[in-house]
Image (spheres, rainbow, N blue to C red):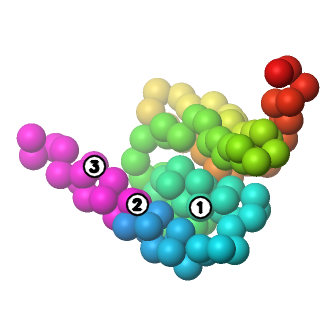
């Protein structure tokens, strides 16, 4: 479908970005870096690395949850979208990756 091409191109570009960033961090990826990699995939707009609200004026507000799991420590770091979207307008909406990440240790439950 003709309407899918921009979505496909955006997805391919994001996965190339993911690959390149992981290659740069081999052996040096800590939790902060892992969160940074995850956020690159979730920030929408013209600049994947920018949380400037003007960056969210293009595309649909779709990044509602961002999660990083550290299996060694059984820690989960997560962030969620914030704000309001009104009839397709962005209003005060921010994607998950542009908000503070919270921490949860899963060993407390198993």
At 40% from the left and 60% from the top, the residue drawn is 14
| Horizontal side of residue 48 vs 16, given as left or right | right
Secondary structure found at label 2: helix
Residue 53, image x and y in percent?
Answer: 62, 56
Secondary structure found at label 3: helix
Res. 37 in view: yes
Secondary structure found at label 1: helix
Which residue appears farthest toward the left when viewing the image?
1
**Foreground of the two, 108 or 19:** 108
At 90% from the left and 26% from the top, the residue drawn is 108
Q: Is residue 9 part of the magenta span, yes or no?
A: yes
Nearer the camera: disc 3 or disc 2? 2
Q: Which mark is residue 7?
A: 3
Residue 70, image x and y in percent?
Answer: 72, 47
At 68% from the left and 56% from the top, the residue drawn is 35
Per the rendered image, the range of residues in magenta is: 1-15
How far apart marks 1 and 2 lie (CA) works out to 10 Å
Identify residue for label 2: 14
Identify residue for label 1: 37
Say if 51 sits above or below 91 in the image: below
Q: Is residue 96 part of the magenta span, yes or no?
A: no
The rendered magenta stretch, by its main secondary structure, is classed as: helix
């Amino acid at each position: 479908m003709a309407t899918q091409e921009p979505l496909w191109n955006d997805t391919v570009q994001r996965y190339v970005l993911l690959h390149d960033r992981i290659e740069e961090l081999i052996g040096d990826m800590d939790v902060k870096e892992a969160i940074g990699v995850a956020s690159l995939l979730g920030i929408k707009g013209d600049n994947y690395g920018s949380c400037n609200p003007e960056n969210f004026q293009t595309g649909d507000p779709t990044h509602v949850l961002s999660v990083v799991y550290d299996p060694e420590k059984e820690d989960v770091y997560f962030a969620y979208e914030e704000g309001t979207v009104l009839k397709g307008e962005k209003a005060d909406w921010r994607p998950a990756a542009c908000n503070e990440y919270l921490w949860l240790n899963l060993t407390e439950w198993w």
